[in-house]
Image: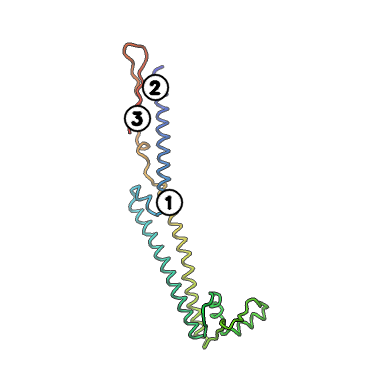
Amino acid sequence: MRAIVTAILSVCLLAGSTLGAQKKDSRERGNAFLKSLVVPGWGQLDSGHKRTATLFALGELSLIGAMYASHSRGVVKRTDYEAYAAQYAGVIGDHSHDFYVDVGNWDCVEDYNEQRLKDREFDQLYTSSSDRWGWDSHEHRVRMKKIRVQSDEAFNAVYYFVGGLILNHIASAIHAGRTARPSQSQTSVVPNWHLSVTPTAGVRGVAVRLSYLF
């Protein structure tokens, strides 16, 4: 009977120890996931995967650098095509992006307005004295349109880099959660709980001693 009780208690304690280890390991994986979700490579670094942490961190820096470089290129190109339109088409003042799209597509505002009237798109007409342009040559108009397209492409590329940053965070978090080091209590075959049962001296019965290793 004593052996049966001892076996039952041992199994219960072992199960409790394993469950505690699993919960601890789950917390560790969750922490690693969240760390790398915030800063790619952080969870890997805490788990000792320095090489992988470096790769995710370098990927993050590269994407951020490319994003700012693309945005800066878009700003420079936008300044160029606005100045080009002012010099060769007589554009004056500040205007929207759509206005410059029309300036690059039409030789003059009169041609543009004439087509809008034919299409009965009266709300698209340019009637303000500041919304005027007239290109001095077809070549200059085509050149301005090309610069404007380059600016748009640079600005649009920023969204792709932002998407890459999001994917890098998610990929790093998933990798960190999967590769986080398991807790010491789970990797050890011997549980932290230790149970010993010995006969008592002088009286009938047994002495049960329960200890826990920290």
Q: How far apart are marks 1 and 2 (CA)?
A: 44 Å
Above/below status of 112 relative to 71: below
Q: In the visual, does 93 lie left or right of 189?
A: right
Residue farthest along the bottom direction in this orientation: 136
Q: Which amino acid does label 1 sit on?
A: Ala
> x, y (%) of residue 105?
56, 80
Instruction: Tell me the SS state at disc 2.
Output: helix
Crowd around label 1: few <14 · some 14–19 · many ≥20 (10 Å): many
Residue at which label 2 appears: 6
Q: What residue type is labelled 3?
A: Tyr
Rendering quarter of residue 204: top left
Crowd around label 3: few <14 · some 14–19 · many ≥20 (10 Å): few
Residue at which label 1 appears: 173
Residue at which label 3 appears: 212
> x, y (%) of residue 115?
64, 81
Q: What residue type is labelled 2?
A: Thr
